[in-house]
Image (cartoon, helix red, strand yellow):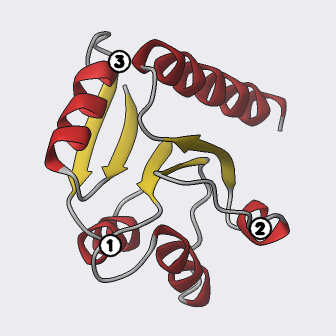
Amino acid sequence: MKKVLVVEDSESFRKETIATLETENKFEITEAKDGSEGFDFLMNQSYDLVILDYHLPQMTGVEILRKLKDNGRSTNCPVIMLTSEYEERGSEIKQLNVVSWVIKPINQKRFKDLVDQVLDYYASRKLGS
């Protein structure tokens, strides 16, 4: 099973995202409701994918990723960043393993397809190493 961390402060959106991922029984999902909790999970666990809201209480998604990097614990997994508005971050986010921005509200089918594509791509890269 692939380990996925969902960090989202909106309970309804977090639950909807988790329900979308649970349609196939291939994910072990951990959920965090704010930046501090998400950071703690990432400091202590490894994940195959992180789904991370940009605007979070306590620290933004980008601040979480920067703080991990500063602590020598950068995510070695892909990150899908969620946002309610487009944020232009360019090269900064690429250095933090953000592979895609998804603007809310999201189409759940397209989102699930994106998750599958990202995980398949990273799995094939690991096999090729």
Q: Which residue is mark 1?
A: 35
Q: Which residue is mark 3?
A: 26
Q: Is residue 5 above or below residue 74?
A: above
First in sequence: mark 3 or mark 1? 3
SS at circle 1: helix
Residue for point 81% across, 64% down: 90
First in sequence: mark 1 or mark 2? 1
Where residue 95 is drawn, which disc sits there? 2
Residue for point 77% across, 60% down: 94
Q: Quadrant of residue 74?
A: bottom right
- Select label 3 or label 1 by which is in front: 1
Relative image position of residue 21 (x, y in whole percent): 33, 23
Q: Is residue 21 above or below residue 91?
A: above
Q: CA distance from mark 3 to mark 2?
A: 28 Å
Left/right placement of residue 111 relative to residue 29 reads right
Q: Residues within 10 Å of mark 1 (few under 14, many from 20)?
A: many
Q: Is residue 72 above or below residue 27?
A: below
Would residue 8 be seen by someone viewing this image from the given angle? Answer: yes
Three-letter code for the amino acid on which mark 3 is drawn:
Lys
Left/right placement of residue 17 relative to residue 42 reads left
Would residue 47 be seen by someone viewing this image from the given angle? Answer: no
Three-letter code for the amino acid on which mark 1 is drawn:
Gly
Relative image position of residue 104 (x, y in whole percent): 45, 40
SS at circle 2: loop
Q: CA distance from mark 1 to mark 2?
A: 19 Å
Left/right placement of residue 103 relative to residue 13 reads right
Three-letter code for the amino acid on which mark 2 is drawn:
Gln
Residue for point 44% across, 54% down: 52
First in sequence: mark 3 or mark 2? 3
